[in-house]
Image (cartoon, helix red, strand yellow):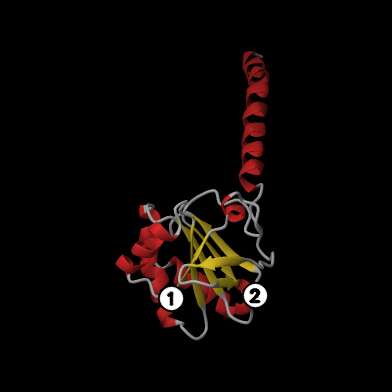
Amino acid sequence: MRRRGQFTALLPVMYSIVLAILLGTTAACTGTARSGVRVALGFEALDGGSIDLRRYRGRPVVLHLFTTWSLASQRDVAQLIDASTRHRDKLVVIGIALDPDGYRLVAPWRQANAVPYLIGLGSPQLVAGKSALGRIAQVPTTVILDRRGAISARVEGPLAEGQLARLLADLASR
């Protein structure tokens, strides 16, 4: 009988914990674009002009949202360079810098890292989570768009070793 009383006393605590977990999970997903959502965005290009994602329909696109000061973002650069050079004619890699000072910080960073892929500057709407990509909860965030421009994969945080190649192989097999 004593055990039953202890268990009953724990029910409100367990209920609160489960509710907190569920609310936390819902809050983390709010504003995050889901897989299959088509993305039509434009960015100011670091080299001048603009980048319109609709222009790349028919080819997969890797969007890497980063800041120049993030060491985790820096680790992803090797995988992005490899993908952009290895699949030059079949794939588009675009880095989207979220640095508040934009060009002043990003241009020297690009040169120092010999980044060959396109670099765009994140708009205030993108930074605020009010774009088709939803809330950017962590830097870096990598989003892969399929040939139709729909979200195929999203990785929040740094890419694991070889993860980009695996995601692209999975996309190619579909």
Q: Which residue is mark 1?
A: 83
Q: Quadrant of residue 151?
A: bottom right
Q: Which residue is mark 2?
A: 54
Place of residue 79 in the rendered image (x, y in percent of width and height, measured from the top left): 39, 69
Place of residue 128 in the rendered image (x, y in percent of width and height, measured from the top left): 60, 49
Residue at 39%, 73% in the rendered image:
81
Place of residue 136 in the rendered image (x, y in percent of width and height, measured from the top left): 56, 52
Place of residue 42 in the rendered image (x, y in percent of width and height, measured from the top left): 61, 67
Q: Quadrant of residue 105?
A: bottom left
Of residues 165 and 16, which is closer to you in this image?
165
Outermost residue toward the left in this view = 112
Label 1 to label 2, Cα distance in Å?
A: 20 Å
The answer, for residue 174, to whether it is visible in the render is no
Q: Count neighbours of disc 1 (C-alpha within 10 A) and say few if under 14, some if 14 to 19, many if 20 or more.
A: many
Of residues 116 and 50, which is closer to you in this image?
50
Q: Count neighbours of disc 2 (C-alpha within 10 A) and say few if under 14, some if 14 to 19, many if 20 or more.
A: some
Q: Amino acid at mark 2?
A: Arg
The answer, for residue 157, to whether it is visible in the render is yes
Residue at 69%, 64% in the rendered image:
37
Q: Quadrant of residue 21?
A: top right
Outermost residue toward the bottom in this view = 89
Q: Amino acid at mark 1?
A: Ala
